[in-house]
Image (tube, rainbow, N blue to C red):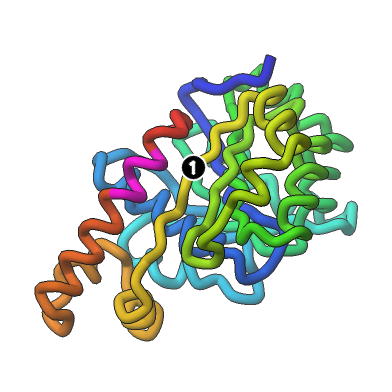
Amino acid sequence: MVPRFNNSRLHFVGGRKGGVGKSFYTRLLIESLRSKGREFTIAECDRVNPDVGRIYKELEEVILAYFSEDERKRSKADALFAEAQKKPVVANLPAQVHQAMLAWFTEDALYELAEREGVSFCHWYVSNGGYDSVQLFYKTVADLGEWMPHVFVRNWGLCDDWSHVDQDPKFQALIEDHSIPVIDLPKCSYLERNFIEAHQLTLSAAESHKDLTVVSRQRIKHFLRQAFQQIEQAGML
């Protein structure tokens, strides 16, 4: 049985492909925790574009960690586990990290240590609905589903028709067999999204930014409300 509700949890936000919305979704998880007044740590694991860590470094505790397929550098990810022993961690993963992350779990038997130390894991898999994205999700669950629950996040900003996924018997069987929640990342209007990215804002800061119109601020407020409802629905926080 995969543990789901231990007091400590390490939340990985991945997707195995660039441009599917991983960093943006990581920021939504962070905002959801902040809105609840929860104590947590942000782990920036993307060495090429550490945008999440950069945006929140003055507001929340941020640690740097990364996964490496080089056995001599595998300990660079150990800070994630050490921090998760104390409080929840939200880890922003780069695209090409799966094999290194899998080696960390299996070759070092992190799943055994987690059971002893009361640390549990969750993988939020962000998808753009593309064929490669969905196929890689199957492989990800096959490799890691034994040790951590997964959440499949449909990014509606990049795909506005998910019927090809929802009606796929293989996908439905996987979801049922592993009890995987399927939730939505609502579409954020282009104008507001572009403003947020251009100014490197937190989403909560954009919600009240003086340079946005009252209508734009309302769009962001509504977007966040919808996104938080979906996150809550997954039952992993």
Rendered location of residue 94, percent (x, y): 66, 63
Q: Quadrant of the N terminus?
A: top right
Q: Quadrant of the C terminus?
A: top left
Q: Residues within 10 Å of mark 1 (few under 14, many from 20)?
A: many
In percent of the image, x 78 and y 51: which residue is there?
136
Circle 1: residue type = Ile
The rendered magenta stretch, by its main secondary structure, is classed as: helix
Looking at the picture, tell me which residue is in the foreground, 141 or 171: 171
Kindly identify which residue carries mark 1: 183
In percent of the image, x 63 and y 53: which residue is there?
14
- Asked if the magenta segment contains residue 88, the reply would be no
**Left or right side of 63 for 146:** right
Rendered location of residue 123, percent (x, y): 61, 41
Magenta residues (range): 226-231
- Report if residue 200 is visible in the image: no
- Report if residue 52 is visible in the image: yes
